[in-house]
Amino acid sequence: MTPREQDPAAPDEAPAVDEERPAVDEQPAVEEASEPTAERAWRRRARATLAPAARVALVGGAVAALVAAAGATSREVSLAASPAASGSTARAVAATDALLTCPGAPLSGTSGVASQSLPSSYLARSAPQRVIEAIVTPNDDAGDIEIAAPGVTRPIATSSTDVARGASPAGGVQVRAKGARAAGLIASQQSVATSETVRGLAVIPCAAPTTESWIVVGGDAPGRQERLVLTNPGENPVQVRLTAYRGDGTRERVGGEDTVIPPNERRNVLLDGLVGTDGVQVVRVQAEGAAVGVSAVDTWLDGVTPRGMAYAAPTAAPSREAVITGVPKGAAMRLVLAAPGEEDAVVTVRALVDGEPRQVNVATVTRGSSATVPIKNTAGARGFLIESDVPVLASLESTVTEAGGDLAWSPATPPITDLAGLATSPSIEGTAVTRTLTIAATGKPATVEVTTVADGEPQTRSVEVPADQAAEVALDQAEGVWVRPVRGDGVHAAVVLSGRGSGGRALAEVVPLVPARAAVQEVELAPVP
């Protein structure tokens, strides 16, 4: 076994790509042996429901195509099988169209549950020119950034500069950038809940939609409630399949076979009602025919006392190695693992500390199930390295118990290949919060360039991270951060927020950096004789 190699299986077939949107990355799938007939029937129904979206245009006797090239989970496109590929040419060009989805109002729009008002604020930024120049020649067309709620005529915010800000109680929210503003685009949504039933800090990156995601969220304590938020940013309906992996080893399709999200709409799904309340929710989300935005929100009401709120971003696809960065200090922690394949997993968990990683647990996870592993002896931990003999999922729950308490989820993240980033507000109304960037390097030492923007001024620094350790960088007044690996291929990063809210209540959140696409491959195929 080589634990540092990812071991995803290829998806059954490549999804179509809407010609009005940039191509999106797809996480690898895990093969399922059960219900092959039902699986095929579900795919046939989805293909019959969804209109094809891919188009190819002939220009001047040659075919021109753009394919994603700079996302952390980007797929390779092979031209070798095409007769027209002979003599083709390819070059990297700056991305000129970017689309990110945000969950929008997280506590409204859930069937069977009373809506609660929780306005959210949004921050979007394109990367400084110096960041893009290190990867590709920037585009000359300045372009703009728009934050909008689908179906609402007036945008939440529009900007012809590098930054856009806005606030809205709307359902789903999309961030779109054109021209030079699209390269390295990052955005985030943040909410601070202060009601009698929900309290806490929740921040999540707005991310590119995908056709497959894994969500880990929730718990078995009374009063825990988890909502899955699915957003369709496209012009065609999307059919979504949900599969739950339970602690008792059962794997079950939930939510019915025909969950369809109409164009430019979202669906909030109460996971308690689908999966149950007897443990952590581990859910695989598969979209057929087009991509969707996926996130979750976790709230905890302990009797009449609100204990916290957190967003949960998708965790990395199953792998023999999972890396979690970002640990709130002073929090109680438990690790959620899942083995979605057909073999039991033997998992070793080590804390990333100064010096050699410290082993904190060894666990066995039954095939097709999830397990919760308590984490002790976390002093000095800045992240965790999870190694397994078969592919597993991992996500870390942190619970702050002092000063009223709060929740945070730290998902495993894929390694950063080209560029990743996060928009993060230096000031959150009614709070005093510090923000720390945590960068981990696994396998080999890494050198990374960290670029931040504060008051409109970019600053770039080089950070050395020893192998199997993590470094921390204070973000101070920065409202955007980008990480670009210069050396090393096992770089992971997240931002930890911690502090106090109104009345001195504890606040905590962990937000992963997500791919910030800077470039695409422009491929010109020679004409077919």
Image: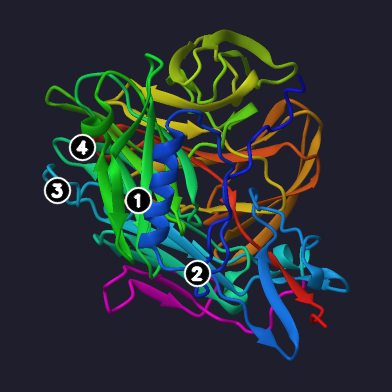
Residue position for label 2: 18
Is residue 150 in the magenta section?
A: yes
Which amino acid type corresponds to the residue marked 4 in the rendered image?
A: Val
Which amino acid type corresponds to the residue marked 2 in the rendered image?
A: Asp
Q: Is residue 440 visible?
A: yes
Residue position for label 3: 115
Which amino acid type corresponds to the residue marked 1 in the rendered image?
A: Leu
Mark toward the viewer: 1 or 4: 1
Q: Badges 1 and 3: C-beta atoms under 8 Å apart?
A: no
Q: Earlier in the sequence, mark 1 or mark 4?
A: 4
Give the x, y percent position of residue 143: 56, 81
Residue position for label 4: 198
Cα distance, mark 1 to mark 3?
17 Å
Cα distance, mark 2 to mark 1?
18 Å
Q: Which residues are magenta?
A: 137-164
Cα distance, mark 4 to mark 2?
38 Å
